[in-house]
Amino acid sequence: MNNINIEKVISVHHWNEKLFSFQTTRNKSFRFINGHFVMIGLIYNNKPLMRAYSIASANYEDYLEFLSIKVPNGLLTSKLKQLKVGDEIIVNNKSVGTLVIDNLKPGNRLFLFATGTGLAPFLSIIKDYRTYDSFEKIVLVHSVRSINELAYKSMIEEQLPNNDLIGKDVKEKLIYYPTVTQQDFYNNYRITNLIKSDNFFNVIKIPKINYKTDRAMICGSPQALNDISKILDDLGFKASSNTNGIGDYVIERAFVNN
């Protein structure tokens, strides 16, 4: 297992009965691009049991952070949810992924559309100074079913604007729009409805999304990926792929479901 690092858990946070996050140590040899995912897991029956997780921490931070759902009877998550400080996990030493700004054409605004734990890669991207150097506005839309699934809301709204490295840019450029679909909340819209809505763009005080000037990233459930992609396609956006290189938007299909 020369390509595997053993990392130690340094903190665990349970957002609710279905959602948790944890931080680990970070091997100095491990490098990644913000937006990447990596295979992580545990040794089970003397063999590595690993799944793909997006990295929620930024590539300049000295720890790794992951956001996970608790899948009933999930072979890996049923064990990860029991992690305690001091426990060990295994992390592949190579990260991959398509949700990186280098896969997008130059543009004026960047829209980050996330459902559920699809927020994770965007947490690293909104901490990346390159993101703010590349775009005039960054719009992060996070859609969840219940209010207690709005992980990292206080971090985005309160801590990030005071970050020593990017705080000034966050205040000037980042627009955070949390929305809850199955409970009363001040935003109660699905992402698909928001993209089609004049009111959404009026509220955040920017012109409607346009393939000529805007770029987008999508991460979340397979249904969300399909539905949001279709709307963007209908608006004239072209997806990035392995065959056509950079595009107007990119999606990530790899996220934990076990």
Image: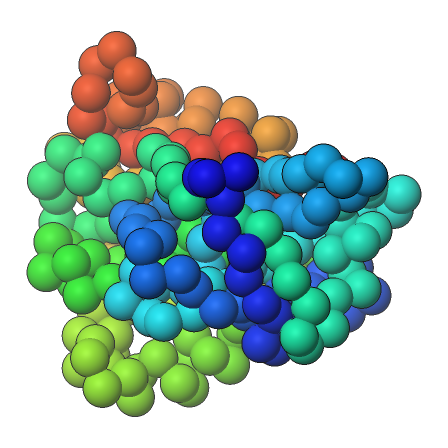
**119 or 93, which lies in front?**
93
- Numbered disc total: 0
165 displayed left or right of 139: left
105 displayed left or right of 208: left
Q: Position of residue 145 (x, y in %)?
A: 71, 55
Which quadrant: the C terminus?
Answer: top right
Q: Residue at x 74, y 66 (%)?
A: 83
Q: Is residue 25 visible?
A: yes
Q: Is residue 119 visible?
A: no
| Residue 125, above or below 99 | below
Q: Which is nearer the eye, 30 or 258?
A: 30
Residue at (40% x, 61% y) in the render = 27
Give the x, y percent position of residue 53: 55, 46
Could you tell me which residue is drawn at 36 percent across and 21 percent down? 234
The answer to which of 31 and 59 lies nearer the viewer is 31
Q: In this view, does 155 lie to the left or right of 59?
A: right
User: Residue at point 30% right, 88% down?
Assistant: 162
In the rendered image, the residue lying farthest to the top is 243
Quadrant of the rendered image containing residue 84: bottom right
**Residue 98 placement, left or right of 213:** right
Q: Is residue 129 above or below residue 54?
A: below
Residue 51: percent from left, percent from top? 62, 38
